[in-house]
Image (cartoon, rainbow, N blue to C red):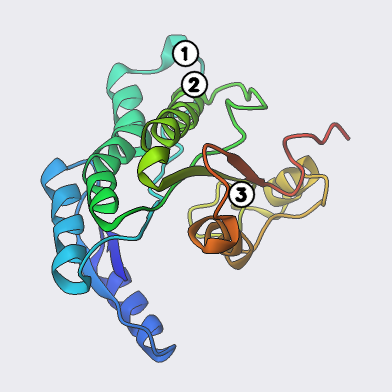
Amino acid sequence: VIVAARRQAELDALVAEIADADGIAIALAGDVRDEAYAKALVDLAVEKFGGLDIAFNNAGAVGLMGPIAELPLEGWRETLDTNLTSAFLGAKYQVPAMVERGGGSLIFTSTFVGHTVGMPGMTSYAASKAGLIGLTQVLAAEYGPKGVRVNALLPGGTDTPAATFKTPESRAFVEGLHALKRVAMPEEIARSALYLASDASSFTTGAALFADGGVSINRT
């Protein structure tokens, strides 16, 4: 597997963790908003493993929040570049490599925000993540005949270092938004991604898979 992130230290720790599980991982640090980096990741996969079968485009940032009248253009662009342009750049090089291989599975991490629920103050985040749904559907239709499946994963609140709930009160509020009245552990979201990556979802493409603990349907 090729693992990608901005910080080398985090990549080194992940490579070691994968090695401990008898896996093989190669890390390449960089910025997913950089086209040269997006191409280099695919080139590395082809060079080291003979091709590309699966790509999980998981980069994301909430970005600046607030009323649209107060949102600076630079903040809007940064969020869209991180969440949507990075996915476009990834797919631009990942899809041809999968076609060359005879097929593959391409996954984008989207969200329920802007898809089933509108949340005030999250203009750029919602727009960028909703854009991934459109990208998913177009690529699924365009490359399905060539054996490439394309799906979006829509997580709910997840207990990660990047989570926006930093206090017991904010965590309780976020948990209360979910039908299950809790947030996900990262492993739970990873299992949904694994499903989309694997042959277990061999007849699934163009889908938006909710792994959100019922936050998109909860009204209590």
Q: Position of residue 2 (x, y in %)?
A: 28, 67
Q: Nearer the viewer, residue 115 or 43?
A: 43
Q: Residue at x 67, y 58 (%)?
A: 184
Say if mark 2 contacts mark 3, CB within 8 Å: no
Quadrant in which the C terminus appears: top right
Q: CA distance from mark 3 to mark 1?
A: 22 Å
| Helix, strand or loop status at disc 2 | helix
Say if mark 2 contacts mark 1, CB within 8 Å: yes
The residue under label 2 is: 123
Q: Nearer the viewer, residue 64 or 181?
A: 181
Say if mark 3 contacts mark 1, CB within 8 Å: no
User: Which corner quadrant of the image does residue 44 belong to?
Assistant: bottom left
- Residue 165 tag number: 3
Q: Earlier in the sequence, mark 3 or mark 1?
A: 1
Q: Position of residue 102 (x, y in %)?
A: 31, 54
User: Which corner quadrant of the image does residue 45 belong to?
Assistant: bottom left
Q: Is disc 1 surrounded by few (<14), some (14 to 19) or many (20+) residues within 10 Å?
A: some
Query: Would residue 132 appear left or right of 187 to someone viewing this image?
Result: left
| Helix, strand or loop status at disc 1 | helix
Q: Nearer the viewer, residue 117 or 145?
A: 145
- Residue 68 tag number: 1
- The amino acid on which the numbered mark 2 sits, given as a three-letter code, is Thr
Q: Position of residue 117 (x, y in %)?
A: 67, 26
- Residue 172 tag number: none
Of badges 2 and 3, nearer the viewer stands 2
